[in-house]
Amino acid sequence: MSLTTIAVNQLSKTFGHHPVLQEIGFEIRQGERVALIGPSGSGKSTLMRHLVGLTRANRHRSCCVHVLGRDIQRAGKLVSASRVERCRTGYIFQQFNLAGRLSVLTNVLVGRLGRMPRWRALLGRFSAEERAMALRALQRVGLAELADQRANTLSGGQMQRVAIARALMQEAELILADEPIASLDPRSAREVMDILKRINEEDGRTVVITLHQVEYAREYCQRAIALKQGRLYYDGPIAQLTDVRLRALYDNAGLDELHRPSATPIPPATLRAAAG
Ligand SMILES: Nc1ncnc2c1ncn2[C@@H]1O[C@H](COP(=O)(O)OP(=O)(O)OP(=O)(O)O)[C@@H](O)[C@H]1O
């Protein structure tokens, strides 16, 4: 039986007086490839940020964000994590977040810092084995020949592939990609999506991708979680997300009740843990 990688229960977030997420709950199992979709402003990035503890949920007794076997936050309080625990989740941003003046290889090696002894991480001393590992990660994203080039000389698509190699170097079991292809041309977007699909299928890493382009979600992901105005609107196989429902998602045309064709029920143990 596959393990639970993400369990979210009763997650709400209000910025000022603006409710951005409202009572979100879902579970994602190990090895799934999930598209997180919804109109601009529906709360996708905010939800992703909650999964890594970059944003704190509203205080609510039953609110819990549980990732890779540990609480990230509970009842609106962040739970501290060790460096190694943090490495288990890789976060890929639309803006790549590379150090432009450093080489491509060094940017990939940076993914290893959290797993190195602190003194070596502070000095930035990487072993031959770590360099070989970084080169292998670059090979997997098709960029080994650019290892010595400065990161700021790369195209957007290449930068995003370096960011994925950095997550591989981190040995992240869960990859959260927040609009990874939003600023890329169709060919580069496809290359990035192909790589994310491959590392999901070949390594069994769980991948959650925020996407604006529904056609990519349909082509590359098995399951969709859709948000509309901060509420869970759909959770189920992407093949069952009908055109009518999709139009209603983006056109504001009603059909606002939650549709959950075969959503995985949250196991009782997780619910009990969430309730404290
Ligand atoms: N730190 C913040 N302070 C105040 N409001 C915020 C903050 N972060 C997000 N918001 C608001 O929360 C809402 C949801 O934003 P979010 O970025 O999560 O949506 P999104 O679905 O990812 O949108 P997009 O697809 O355009 O990136 C927006 O109205 C945004 O303005």
Image (tube, rainbow, N blue to C red):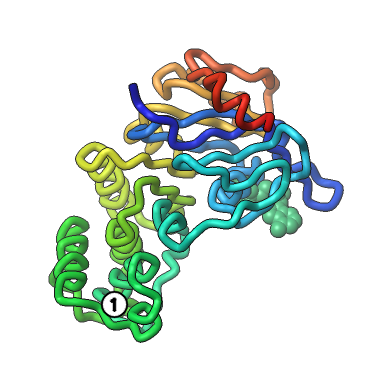
Q: Which residue occupies 30% across, 51% down?
A: 192
What amino acid does circle 1 point to?
Thr
- As drawn, the residue found furthest toward the right would be 17
Q: Which residue occupies 16% across, 67% down?
A: 135
Is 214 on the left-hand or right-hand side of 266? left
- As drawn, the residue found furthest toward the top would be 261
Residue 27, position in %: x, y? 51, 29
Q: Foreground: 103 or 69? A: 69
Q: Foreground: 62 or 197? A: 62
Q: Which residue occupies 62% across, 25% down?
A: 272
Pointer 1 residue: 106
On-image quarter of the N terminus: top left
Q: Foreground: 12 or 195? A: 12
Is 91 on the left-hand or right-hand side of 276? left
On-image quarter of the C terminus: top right
Is 256 on the left-hand or right-hand side of 186? right
Q: Regarding mark 1 in the picture, which secondary structure is present there?
A: helix
Q: Foreground: 217 or 16? A: 16
Residue 217, position in %: x, y? 40, 35
